[in-house]
Image: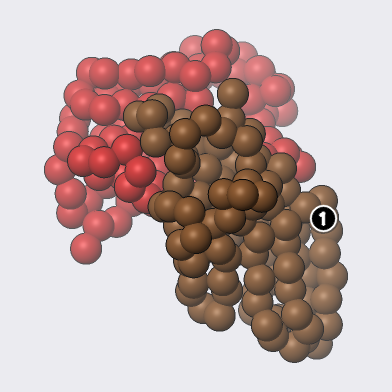
Amino acid sequence: SQTIHQWPATLVQPVGSPLSLECTVEGTSNPNLYWYRQAAGRGLQLLFYSVGIGQISSEVPQNLSASRPQDRQFILSSKKLLLSDSGFYLCAWRRGVQSTDTQYFGPGTRLTVL
Amino acid sequence: GNSVTQMEGPVTLSEEAFLTINCTYTATGYPSLFWYVQYPGEGLQLLLKATKADDKGSNKGFEATYRKETTSFHLEKGSVQVSDSAVYFCALLSNFGNEKLTFGTGTRLTIIP
């Protein structure tokens, strides 16, 4: 069966510091991968998605970036965090066969920027 | 563009009450529709889905029917339990190959014993 991991589970960082969040998927190959952010009291916003190694699409311009160095690894980064980057970050995957296949979510990383 | 409008929360019900959480959508073509649930401190879990008109998704006693004529996908459960307390998200995925899941804002449900 497939599983998706995210770490760290929680993170407290000062404004201006760098960020690296990691997501890995097990039990499948060539998945489509996604990063979402859930800000307090708001819905989910798609940040990035990737259909293959080195292929990243950005949905929202911001100070965050994403990379996919390996087939089942997806990394969310920032060089300098802003207060507005606080939120709950969720990674998701789905099979790349049909666009309507279900997206499955990881446990999330709660980021607080102080 | 695509959008999902979800019933405003929070919703508080007594155990064994009937639940309805309304969801309507705007989309071109024939999207797939989903309900996700988020328990406190956790990520999202797929609750149920429907991929074409008149399909009924069901899981754990929850049901939702894809109504194209009313562009709705309301979530229902006949008898809620305390363990159903969570935030529920309605979402759609376009059939035009766009990777983006469009979510509603979520409805917080609290069940009291």
Q: Which residue is mark 1?
A: B9
Which residue occupies the foreground of this view, A27 or A77?
A27
Report which quarter residue B27 is drawn in. Answer: top right
Toward the left, the furthest residue is: A29
Q: Is residue A102 left or right of residue B104?
A: left
Report which quarter residue B82 is drawn in. Answer: bottom right
The residue depicted at 33 percent of the width and 47 percent of the height is A101
Q: Colour of chain A?
A: red
Q: Is residue B88 left or right of residue A98?
A: right
Q: Quadrant of the C terminus of chain B?
A: bottom right
Residue A61, compared with residue B97, is above or below; it is above
Toward the front, the furthest residue is: B69
Q: Count residues near mark 1 (Cα–Cα under 10 Å), then give few for <14, some for 14-19, many for 20+.
A: some
Q: Is residue B37 left or right of residue B100?
A: right
Q: Is residue A73 left or right of residue B69?
A: left
State the image coordinates of residue B101 (x, y, percent, origin top left).
49, 37
State the image coordinates of residue A17 (x, y, percent, origin top left).
56, 18
**Residue A80 in sight in this render:** no
The residue depicted at 63 percent of the width and 25 percent of the height is A85
The residue depicted at 22 percent of the width and 51 percent of the height is A26
**Residue B71 in sight in this render:** yes
Residue A3, compared with residue B100, is above or below; it is below
State the image coordinates of residue A89 (x, y, percent, origin top left).
53, 38
As drawn, the chain in brown is B
Which residue occupies the foreground of this view, A50 or B55?
B55
Subunit that carries the residue with mark 1: B
SS class, disc 1? loop
The residue depicted at 83 percent of the width and 76 percent of the height is B13
